[in-house]
Image (tube, grey):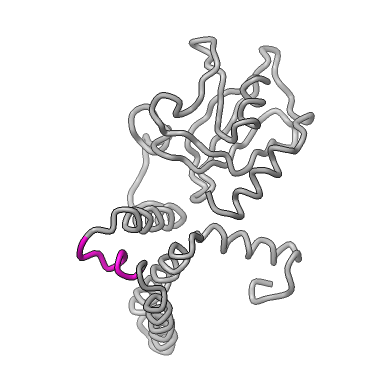
Amino acid sequence: MSRRAGRAARSWQNRGVEGIRFDENGLVPCVVQDARTGEVLTLAYMNREALERTRATGETWFWSRTRRELWHKGGTSGNVQSVEELRWDCDGDTVLALVEPAGPACHTGERTCFHNGAVEPPVPAEALAILERTIEQRRVERPDGSYTAELLGDPVRIGDKLREEADEAARAAAEESDERLTEEAADVLYHLAVLLASRGLRLADVFAELNERRRGARRPGPAT
């Protein structure tokens, strides 16, 4: 979890949940969404104890309507879901959990329970998350011959490459070829993601900063 996400998690854990309305069975549906991509991972149910355990541990807990018992997502498989934010809708009868999943959400091994009818390639936000996961894998494994692994070990080189690719993108903007501009922009995004990863940061931290600017919590900048 990023440093900024960690602060957000502590904030929601300390916030009251008096606005949540449980149904006649003492349950409330919980939509689980990937905080990085926005992809809906699953729909499960919480009772009050599951909600309190989720708040206490920072990981999702649910109530199984078939087994009639509490269950900790990933408690057996290891595919836990670290909660970055917990919200509920305007009526208080549905909870939204924004999570960072450690693995697939579905018991079938698919990343989401809503994989039926899924199409490829992934939507843009998913593509960015896949890129970050790949970079993180290279950082941990450091495979021989990996360009990404080499860059991660040389922050100065990453900066030089980012400047180079940004210049190429600027040059491409003066041309009529949308294809070349798209290619150069992809190079910029890739090298920016590598630079952030080398500092323990993620694109989500950049998006959070943009949101802060949108809300006026930061000094005016290009995003405003």
Lateral position of residue 13 relative to residue 34, left or right: right
Residue sitting at 61 percent across and 22 percent down? 50
Asked whether, in this view, residue 138 is left or right of residue 28, the answer is left
Main secondary-structure element of the magenta-colored stretch: helix
- Image position of 115 (left or right of 32): left
The residue shown at (47%, 37%) is 41
Measured along the vertical axis of the image, is residue 77 above or below residue 128? above
Image location (x, y in percent) of residue 180: 34, 79
Please say whether residue 35 is one of the residues in the magenta stretch.
Answer: no
Residue at image location 50% in from the left, 43% down from the top: 100
Above or below, 215 against 62 in this view is: below
Q: Residue at x 42, y 37 (%)?
A: 112
Magenta residues, as a range?
144-151
Q: Is residue 38 above or below residue 63?
A: below
The percent position of residue 174, horizontal first and vertical second, equals 43, 89
The part of the image, by quadrant, that contains residue 222 is bottom right
Residue 101: percent from left, percent from top? 46, 40
| Rendered position, 2 above or below 97 | below
Q: Residue furthest front?
A: 153
- Residue closer to the observer: 171 or 14: 14
